[in-house]
Amino acid sequence: MSVDLSTSIAGVKLPNLFFNASGVWCQQEAELTELLNSESGSLITKSATFEPREGNPSPRYLPLEHGSINSMGLPNEGYEYYLEYAKKYDYNNAKPLFISLSGLKLEDNIQMVTKFVEADLPCILEVNFSCPNVPGKPQLGYDMEGMAKALRTLAPIIKKPFGIKLPPYFDIVHFDQVAEICNSVDNLAFVTCVNSVGNGLAIDFETETVAIKPKDGFGGLGGQMILNTALANVNAFARRLKNGKQVIGVGGVTSGKEAFLHVLAGASAVQIGTQLKEEGPQFFARVKKELEDIMVAKGYKSLDDFRGKVKTL
């Protein structure tokens, strides 16, 4: 039995549901080319700030036994670098291209989205409302009033369908509040959840020191250990979003099994972070094959057959 892994996000078809999480394997053009040459269904650029950033001092990323911890500090080439990349991108023959923007203030986001709108490109914008690793900067995703204001400001400028990257939420009322804000914006087409679980702390038992340098060792957790938090957020928003708004799931995918669970919870596409960082772009071939095998074993021919159909007790 053949299975179909294709999906669509914001009205754009992806040959399969997998791509990188913004921040991993996507800062420079050489990395983006490797994603293009992989078996991913799409690719997204590094979250861009208005000016280039070197990011936080190293060590700022460390794999852990069940995932990773990082405090990268948004290292990126500046939005103009990714705008130029998007301008020369071969949209007719390549995979769909997502562009991640992460202004340090609303004015930055306004200027960046305006430049992309003026360029009139077929790329899909994802505005990152979850940047836990910039010292002294709060996450917009935890500021309901600020998030609503930002969306009211940016959505009319963008005009086309776009998405936002969200932090993880841990309270039912926050799912309700965020969904209400998202549902009020007509051209908000998708939410990507979750970003890393903020402010974890890894300590080396032997040396009795923290694992990473920035923020006295505090950093975002990713990988296998955040799977259940990610699934909860995917399912919470899949249940609450209206008018065809979609969820892109990210967090804890190390094999086809976790990808299956993300779709079962309601994800329309799945991004890979920690495992891509550790395994490289060849991971996409493995996870595709594993998900296909699971679908064959369960008798599912397409993602629509089981998307969002997790059973409750």
Image (cartoon, helix red, strand yellow):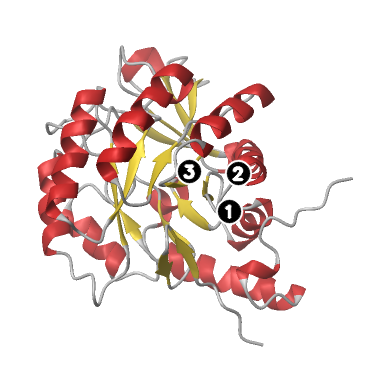
Question: Earlier along the polypeptide chain: callout 3 or callout 1?
Answer: 3
Asked if disc 3 and disc 1 are in contact, CB closer than 8 Å, the reply is no
**Which marked residue is nearer to the observer: mark 2 or mark 3?**
3
Where does the image place residue 240, in percent across and percent down from the top left? 64, 40
Label 2 to label 3: alpha-carbon separation? 9 Å
State the residue position of label 2. 234
State the residue position of label 1. 267
Residue at 53%, 20% in the rendered image? 205
Which residue sits furthest bottom? 1
Where does the image place residue 159, in percent across and percent down from the top left? 30, 47
User: Label 3 sits on what residue type?
Assistant: Val
Asked if disc 1 and disc 2 are in contact, CB closer than 8 Å, the reply is yes
Residue closest to the eye, 212 or 140: 140
Question: Earlier along the polypeptide chain: callout 1 or callout 2?
Answer: 2
Residue 108 against residue 193 in the figure, above or below: above
Residue closest to the eye, 259 or 209: 259
Residue at 46%, 36% in the rendered image? 195
The quadrant in which the C terminus is found is top right
Residue closest to the eye, 154 or 85: 154
Residue 190 against residue 14 in the figure, above or below: above
Q: Classify mark 1: helix, strand or loop.
A: loop
State the residue position of label 3. 191
Residue closest to the eye, 62 or 13: 13
User: Label 2 sits on what residue type?
Assistant: Val
